[in-house]
Image (cartoon, helix red, strand yellow):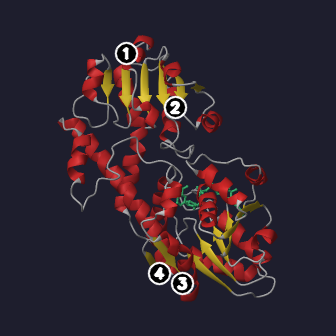
Amino acid sequence: MKQICVIGVGYVGLVTAACFADLGNRVVALDINEAKIEGLKNGLMPIYEPGLEELVSRNVKAGRLSFTTSYADGLSGTEFVFIAVGTPMGVDGEADLRYVAESARMVAVNMTNPLIIVNKSTVPVGTGDWTADIIRKNQKTPIQFAVVSCPEFLREGSAISDFMQPYRTILGSLDLDAAEKVAQLHLPLRAPIMITDLRTAEMIKYASNAFLATKISFINEIANICEALGADVKEVAVGMGYDKRIGSSFLDAGLGYGGSCFPKDVKALEYMAAEKGRHPQLLNAVMEINDDRRPMAVERVREMVGDLNGKSIGLLGLSFKPNTDDMRDAPSLLIADLLHKAGAKVKAYDPVAMEIAHRLMPEVEMGEGIYEVAEGCDALMLITEWNEFKQLDLARLKSIMKQAIIFDGRNIYDPAEMKQAGFRYRGLGRGYNND
Ligand SMILES: NC(=O)c1ccc[n+]([C@@H]2O[C@H](COP(=O)([O-])OP(=O)(O)OC[C@H]3O[C@@H](n4cnc5c(N)ncnc54)[C@H](O)[C@@H]3O)[C@@H](O)[C@H]2O)c1
């Protein structure tokens, strides 16, 4: 049993803490947000993530997982410190490292024994060295420590299985001994472990996210071309995906990538490159294609409904993807805003994100369910492909909507079925539109 302190109890930190505890370690999860820690001590989850509540509760009961706001308590007797604080987008597109800096400073001030400090946050190349500098400068007395980069690749919505069955563990450090010790912690996960230098590990995370974002923008570009040429992008993606060199994942045309990672990470990589005088043309194109998706969706609805002023539009799904309540950079935010600015009345329903969404989009009327939202609408827009939206009662919808119009932002419906049910339907790059 190893003792671990995880700093930052968000989507990554809480999952990391609970999973390491489940693997038999003693874990203290630390956050400066007192309400979050107080809630967790009382069994309240600060985020929605399938399976997390049960995992946390089981490990708290077993005495392997505890919560604190105190660095002194969190660091006492620990060997490993995982930093998992946020690194949001700064004003110019760079990663904002203030939370990483503050947690490193607090570790330095409060550490009383040698530590291996493992950075899980997504941070610009060079941050590991910079973190070591902060710690050295803020230590009261020199105590030995090592910094290891261990970027996280989990996805919200499947975070626990992603953590427990990762494709790989990447470790970067100048201190091989420390990297080996962190590797030992990950051995039960039975995934390939790659040990490299700090900067390369940090870059692997950005390059991986930028590649996945590129795949998404690529298929969205193909969707645009399919639309013009009468091909069906959904079938095109299936045909492409049979080729193992291409793979079938991340080939779903849609409303563009969102969430807390891809938008900020692609932008931060572009910023790092530009700062060093490079011209990341591909990254710029990826972002440009992505930026067009939300206004394009509103335009498609306008084409079907006509002037949006005074129209009633229903949104199905608000979170940036299914199985999470995360609203960071969710397509629904800009879409609702554009509809609202065009004079439309916007109603919405999401299985878990409505409470958070309501704070971010007070002008949107939140409904109890699909059919409450659809009642009297001129068009329904499928924004997030939650399972419960996959089987709609089309006859019921048609009878309660003002106009039978559906915009399918995730291509989950069958255009022929929609036509048969009497709907005017638009997907993305489906070749054939019945509007
Ligand atoms: N969310 C994801 O799906 C995901 C996946 C892979 C990597 N990442 C990366 O992991 C990092 C964390 O992301 P997240 O989504 O979990 O963030 P989050 O915003 O959900 O959580 C961050 C937490 O850190 C806490 N915090 C901030 N400053 C602190 C401090 N000085 N001391 C202690 N706690 C502090 C905040 O209160 C918050 O609870 C980011 O760098 C992100 O890019 C995120």
Closer to the camera: disc 3 or disc 4? 3
For the residue marked with disc 1, what is the amino acid? Ala
Closer-to-camera residue (338/55): 55
Q: Tags 3 and 4 in contact by the CB under 8 Å rule?
A: yes
Seen in the image, is 243 located left or right of residue 252? left
Which mark is on residue 180? 3
From the viewer's perspective, is residue 178 above or below residue 341? Answer: below
Residue 148 in view in this figure: yes
Closer to the camera: disc 1 or disc 4? 1
Q: Tags 1 and 3 in contact by the CB under 8 Å rule?
A: no
Q: Residues within 10 Å of mark 4 (few under 14, many from 20)?
A: many
Seen in the image, is 273 located left or right of residue 146? left
For the residue marked with disc 4, what is the amino acid? Ile
Q: What separation in Å lies between label 1 and label 3 (alpha carbons)?
A: 61 Å
Location of residue 264 in the rendering, given as x and y in whole percent from the top left corner = 51, 56
Closer to the camera: disc 3 or disc 2? 3
